[in-house]
Image (cartoon, grey):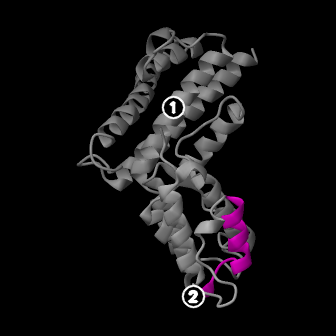
Amino acid sequence: MTQPPVSDEVSAALARFFFSGDGPSHSKLSNAFTGAGYGADDPYSATTQTPNKEVRVRTVLGAARRRRARARELVDALLVQLRVHGSFDPDRPAFASRETVKTAQRAFGRCGWTLTDDGILSVAGAIDLATGGREALDEQVDRLRRSTEDPGQLLGSAKDLLEAVAKFVLEELGLEEPKGAGFDHLWYLARERLGILPEQVDPALPGASNIKAILQSSWKIAEQVNKLRVLQGTGHGRTLPTGVSADLALLVVREACSVAEYSLVQLDRQRHH
């Protein structure tokens, strides 16, 4: 289960948005803290106008670490105020700076969460097929293609994307997902239904052997994304496996997006025939 989006690092990263009085006003902070149920933890005195906003944010987020039931609500409330203020908008004077945003993205990433460049928080790799369906998959493909965030974190998102695509294909083509089916089995069934297994290629086609090799390679990419993600999870934190550079991880993630996109295009073709 994903942990709540609070940690010492998240507290420090969000406090940076309020350095030297930057960010939303004291009254906006009070509204966010009270609305999320942490008003009693706020040390601010309207009479003395102390402590400063940075200290307030760190103190209240510290309370949220101890009592996590509404921590997500608190973080979302702070992000709403930051977005409205313009802290995530590089075209507005209130923009906090790219480095401040990236620091927050890394901090949330280490908690298992993704913060977009415009300040939207979500569980890393989460794709809600029940409510988002195909649109959710397309958005995730697009986000991962363009992302320059922590590559190790993105590996997990790519694996979750590929698994969600396989499940979506099976559901759309009327095949019930087998209970307890693992990543490899799901993808085999999805590829079979889409007609993109190497052995399903007509040998009489010009370039049949090349097409088979390409289809096999596409599966290998999906398979290796899953295996890299497993290796990544065996160490402490969310570090990349030894020998996998950040550039290589980003290459793998973007190749995984191509596999996902190709599978969805083939699904579209089947449904329109």
Is 125 part of what is drawn in magenta?
no
Which residue is at 52% across, 45% downward?
124
Residue 2 in the image: x percent, y percent?
49, 42
| The disc label shown at residue 20, or none | 2
Residue 225, quarter of the rendered image: top left
Measure how far apart labels 1 and 2 are at the Cα level: 44 Å
Which residue is at 49% across, 67% downward?
11
Secondary structure of residue under mark 2: helix
Q: Is residue 133 among the parts visible in the rendering? A: yes
Which amino acid, mark 2? Ser
| The disc label shown at residue 144, or none | none
Magenta stretch bounds: 21-36
Which amino acid, mark 1? Leu
Residue 51 in the image: x percent, y percent?
57, 84
Is 35 part of what is drawn in magenta?
yes
Front one among 200 and 254 = 254
Horizontal relation, residue 227 to residue 163: left or right: left
At label 2, counting other C-alpha atoms closer than 10 Å, the crowd grade (few under 14, some 14-19, many 20 or more) is few
Horizontal relation, residue 233 to residue 53: left or right: left
Upstream in sequence: badge 1 or badge 2: 2
Query: For the view shown, which residue lies furthest in the bottom direction?
Result: 48
**Secondary structure mostly seen in the magenta stretch:** helix
The residue mark sitting in front, 1 or 2, is 2
* Quarter of the image where the C terminus is located: top right
